[in-house]
Amino acid sequence: MARYQSEFTQFLNELKTDHPNLEAEQQAGRALLWDKEPLSVEDQRRAKAAKLKQRAYVYSND
């Protein structure tokens, strides 16, 4: 029995066969922007101290 594949699935399969290193490039891009080492305790303390307290109603001119 032939299984149905949408045009989009066919496109993705074709893209993956034409560009076999595409997934590795995507993972490298994700690592560059999102996968970061956890902050040290000292860095966490400095980041917490650097935050400004937000007013209860930010649109007020008080």
Image (cartoon, rainbow, N blue to C red):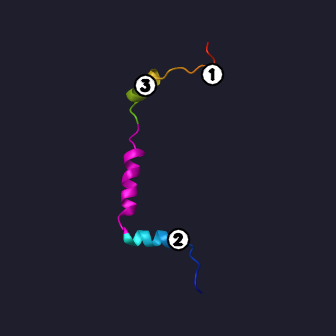
Q: Image height check: is 35 above or below 41?
A: below
Q: CA distance from mark 1 to mark 2?
A: 47 Å
Q: Quadrant of residue 42?
A: top left
Residue 3 falls within the magenta-colored stretch: no
Which of the two discs, 2 and 3, labels the residue nearer the N terminus? 2
Where disc 3 sits, the SS reads: helix
Q: Quadrant of residue 44?
A: top left
- Nearest the viewer among 42 and 62 is 62
Which label was assigned to residue 45?
A: 3
Badge 1: residue crowd in 10 Å (few <14, some 14–19, many ≥20):
few
List the residue tagged with mark 1. 59
| Residue type indicated by callout 3 | Arg
| Residue type indicated by callout 1 | Tyr
Q: Position of residue 39 (x, y in %)?
A: 40, 34
Where disc 1 sits, the SS reads: loop
List the residue tagged with mark 2. 9
